């Protein structure tokens, strides 16, 4: 009897087909992608310190120096903010108004310094006497004085901020500083003398018959100069016209007045800048605001621009009759 051959098992007879599994292309997590592409600010300044020590004024100083500033930002938003903001200069004001600020801020600062090595922490300090006087003058409550006297609140805040103060790159006592001295300190520390913004001068011509502008700091009356209004061919033109300018320049007083005016402003403007005045508005007036005042405002603008000052010129009444 012929033995029958046992068929091979199905697994041996037919090799199973392998399934080809295609793995999806990895897509970076949105948060990780933003971190990879973000650009760190050139200058990052954290400002903190005792309540009443001048943080609000420092906030204004940083804004005037070109910083993108945020006041009283919740601590949980500090790092997300840095992932989104594209400004080259960033200032963040933080203090005990944030719950548990003293314990939560140091680790946040450590992480931020890894991402932005040039980040600096400014701590504003002041004496108890000066802080009590400031709160008395402003009549604003201390953040921690809800259920305690002001002096107790000040001492509690100072105790809470001891560790934060020890981490500061810059500590400044504002007790005896004027606002001008504090602004100067901020300018030198966080921008430098070369980056100091020049005072912006606005030169506005106007006509006295339409009223004196109320938003100017200095007014100069030029109604003593030769008046083109009485020359028929010049009457419809304005002070920027070469023919009008030539007529006014024939007056021997014109050149002397412009020289004296420039000399006076050469003396005066640095004094205003020393007091950190950001804007200065100069009004130049004649009878109708069409000829002489327009001419002088234009000449003054050129003279000041030649001295490196940014100047804005406007002619309020040049087209009025």
Image (spheres, rainbow, N blue to C red):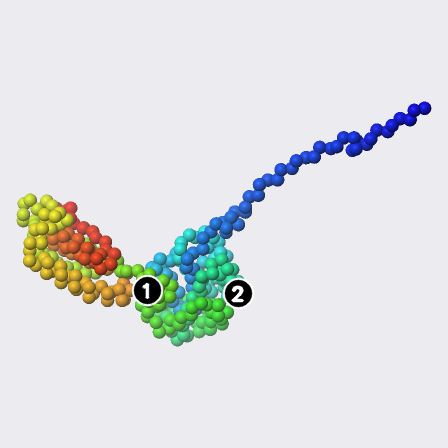
- Residue 93 position, x and y percent, is 42, 61
The percent coordinates of residue 217 (x first, y second) are 21, 60
Q: Is residue 5 left or right of residue 104?
A: right
Res. 209 in view: no
Quarter of the figure with the N terminus: top right
Extreme residue in the front direction: 2
Q: Position of residue 45 (x, y in %)?
A: 42, 62
Between 259 and 171, the one nearer to me in the picture: 259
Mark 2, Cα crowd under 10 Å, few <14 / some 14-19 / many 20+, is few
Given the current orientation, which residue lies at the most extreme top position?
A: 1
Query: Which numbered tag is attached to residue 193?
Result: 1
Q: CA distance from mark 2 to mark 1?
A: 36 Å
Q: Is residue 16 left or right of residue 98?
A: right
Is residue 2 left or right of 217 when viewed as pictured? right
The correct choice, above or below, for 155 with respect to 61 in the image is below
Q: Which of 122/263 is in front?
A: 263
Residue 103 is labelled as 2
Please name the residue shown 43% across and 56% down the image. Answer: 41
């Amino acid at each position: 009897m012929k033995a029958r051959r046992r068929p091979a098992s199905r697994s041996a007879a037919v090799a199973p087909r392998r399934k080809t599994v295609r793995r999806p292309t990895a897509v970076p997590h949105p948060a990780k992608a933003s971190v990879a592409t973000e650009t760190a600010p050139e200058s990052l300044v954290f400002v903190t310190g005792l309540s009443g020590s001048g943080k609000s004024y420092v906030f204004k100083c940083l804004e005037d120096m070109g910083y993108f500033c945020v006041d009283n930002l919740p601590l949980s938003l500090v790092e997300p903010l840095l992932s989104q903001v594209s400004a080259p200069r960033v200032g963040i004001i933080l203090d005990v108004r944030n719950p548990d600020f003293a314990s939560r801020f140091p680790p946040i600062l450590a992480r931020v310094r890894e991402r932005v090595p040039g980040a600096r922490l400014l701590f504003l300090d002041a004496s108890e006497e000066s802080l009590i006087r400031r709160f008395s003058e402003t009549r604003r409550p201390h953040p921690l004085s809800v259920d305690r006297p002001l002096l107790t609140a000040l001492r509690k805040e100072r105790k809470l901020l001891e560790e934060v103060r020890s981490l500061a790159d810059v500590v400044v006592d504002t007790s005896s500083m004027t606002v001008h001295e504090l602004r100067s300190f901020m300018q030198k520390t966080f921008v430098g003398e070369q980056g100091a913004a020049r005072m912006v001068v606005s030169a506005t011509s106007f006509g006295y018959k339409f009223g004196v502008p109320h938003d100017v700091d200095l007014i100069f009356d030029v109604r003593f100069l030769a008046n083109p209004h009485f020359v028929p061919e010049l009457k419809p033109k304005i002070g920027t016209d070469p023919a009008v300018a030539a007529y006014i320049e024939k007056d021997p007083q014109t050149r002397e007045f412009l020289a004296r005016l420039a000399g006076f402003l050469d003396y005066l403007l640095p004094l205003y800048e020393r007091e950190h005045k950001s804007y200065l508005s100069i009004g130049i007036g004649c009878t109708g605001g069409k000829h002489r005042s327009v001419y002088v405002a234009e000449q003054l603008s050129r003279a000041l621009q030649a001295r490196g000052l940014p100047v804005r010129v406007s002619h309020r009444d040049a087209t009025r009759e």
